[in-house]
Amino acid sequence: MATILIVEDNPDNMKLFAAVLGIRGHQVLQLPGGDRLLEEMRQRKPELVLLDIQLPGQDGFQLLDRLRAALGSALPPVVALTAHAMSGDREKALAAGFSGYLTKPIDIVSFGTSVEAFLAGR
């Protein structure tokens, strides 16, 4: 299966995401914030990144810009995770360059399939 890096500051969400994806056979890398994101990307080379939009310090949009500048075409798909699903937020994330958009709380039945669809489309 795939190596997936999750950047999420809520420990309960992180446990749930990792459990759902781990059960499906994926290797899950976990970061509570964006401080070491670029370093992890270069060392571990995940095939997909799930990036929380609302992080302390730099938000998901700023982190995506940093990743794109540093990794260029080597950047894997980066999917936005957000609890603030307002009208237009999905479009804003896609326009900013995210490969997809998932809302929290997740539906544990469809979450794994949704994530795997982004892997299939890379």
Image (spheres, rainbow, N blue to C red):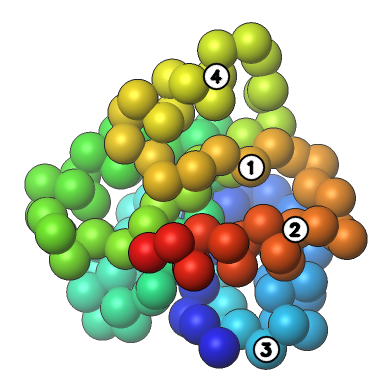
Q: Amino acid at mark 1?
A: Leu
How far separated are the C-alphas under marks 3 and 4? 31 Å
Residue 91 horizontal/vertical position (percent): 48, 21
How far separated are the C-alphas under marks 1 and 4? 11 Å
| Identity of the residue drawn at 29% across and 69% down | 41
| Identity of the residue drawn at 62% across and 35% down | 82
Looking at marks 2 and 3 on the same chain, the residue that comes earlier in the sequence is marked by 3
Q: Quadrant of residue 76?
A: bottom left
Badge 2 crowding class, 10 Å Cα cut-off, few under 14, some 14 to 19, many 20 or more, is some
Q: Amino acid at mark 3?
A: Gly
Q: How many numbered discs sit on the rendered protein?
A: 4
Q: Any mark on residue 25, and which?
A: 3
Looking at marks 2 and 4 on the same chain, the residue that comes earlier in the sequence is marked by 4
Badge 1 crowding class, 10 Å Cα cut-off, few under 14, some 14 to 19, many 20 or more, is many
Badge 4 crowding class, 10 Å Cα cut-off, few under 14, some 14 to 19, many 20 or more, is few
Q: Which residue is mark 4?
A: 89
Looking at marks 3 and 4 on the same chain, the residue that comes earlier in the sequence is marked by 3
How far separated are the C-alphas under marks 2 and 4? 19 Å
Taking 70 as reference, is 66 above or below it? above
Say what secondary structure mark 3 lies in: loop
Looking at marks 3 and 1 on the same chain, the residue that comes earlier in the sequence is marked by 3
Q: Amino acid at mark 2?
A: Phe
How far separated are the C-alphas under marks 2 and 3? 14 Å
Residue 68 horizontal/vertical position (percent): 18, 48
Looking at marks 1 and 4 on the same chain, the residue that comes earlier in the sequence is marked by 4
Q: Which residue is mark 2?
A: 111
- Does residue 57 appear in the picture of this structure? no
Q: Quadrant of residue 48?
A: bottom left
Q: Any mark on residue 118, and which?
A: none
If the image is split into quadrants, where does the C terminus sit?
bottom left
Q: Which residue is mark 1?
A: 102
Say what secondary structure mark 1 lies in: strand
